[in-house]
């Protein structure tokens, strides 16, 4: 049974930084791309980033490019999302997922950007 557990969210001021973690179990972790998706209040799921199973490629939505970085530690089955220069529009529930659409995702961690 695949389990994804996100952590690291919180409240931060505009311009601040956070690092989210996603701990995975129940799958051959090094065989999967892992994605981050988010859902802002009243909106649908939005794809944020993806990282190749071995970390050989990374992709980002235009809205977060040059501010967010995804990385992974396959020895410990963890994926990270480092977020810099956060903006109020980044406020959302952030999920990691094994598919780009976010259908197979964890329970999420809340990020709130507010002064």
Image (cartoon, rainbow, N blue to C red):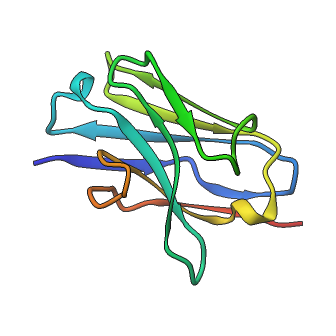
Query: In front: 39, or 58?
Result: 58
Estimate the x, y position of residue 70 in percent, counting from the top left. Answer: 55, 32
User: In the displayed structure, would residue 16 be above or below residue 89?
Assistant: above
26 horizontally vs 20: left or right: left
- Outermost residue, left direction? 1
Estimate the x, y position of residue 109 in percent, counting from the top left. Answer: 50, 58
The residue depicted at 70 percent of the width and 59 percent of the height is 90
Rendered-image quadrant of the C terminus: bottom right
Query: In front: 86, or 52?
Result: 52
Q: To which quarter of the image does residue 43 belong?
A: bottom right
Query: In front: 51, or 10?
Result: 51
The residue depicted at 87 percent of the width and 48 percent of the height is 15
User: In the displayed structure, would residue 106 be above or below residue 70?
Assistant: below
Estimate the x, y position of residue 50 in percent, counting from the top left. Answer: 46, 37
User: In the displayed structure, would residue 47 be above or below residue 42?
Assistant: above
- Outermost residue, front direction? 62
The residue depicted at 83 percent of the width and 44 percent of the height is 85
77 horizontally vs 36: left or right: left
Estimate the x, y position of residue 28 in percent, counting from the top left. Answer: 16, 28
Q: To which quarter of the image does residue 110 belong?
A: bottom right
Total marks drawn? Answer: 0
């Amino acid at each position: 049974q695949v389990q994804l557990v996100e952590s690291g969210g919180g409240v931060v001021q505009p311009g601040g930084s956070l690092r989210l973690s996603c701990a995975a179990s129940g799958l051959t972790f090094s065989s999967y791309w892992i994605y981050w998706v988010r859902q802002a209040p009243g909106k649908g799921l939005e794809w944020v980033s993806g990282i190749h199973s071995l970390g050989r490629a990374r992709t980002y939505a235009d809205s977060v490019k040059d501010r967010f970085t995804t990385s992974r530690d396959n020895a410990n089955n963890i994926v990270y999302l480092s977020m810099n220069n956060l903006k109020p529009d980044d406020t959302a529930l952030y999920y990691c997922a094994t598919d780009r659409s976010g259908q197979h995702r964890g329970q999420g961690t809340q990020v709130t950007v507010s002064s």
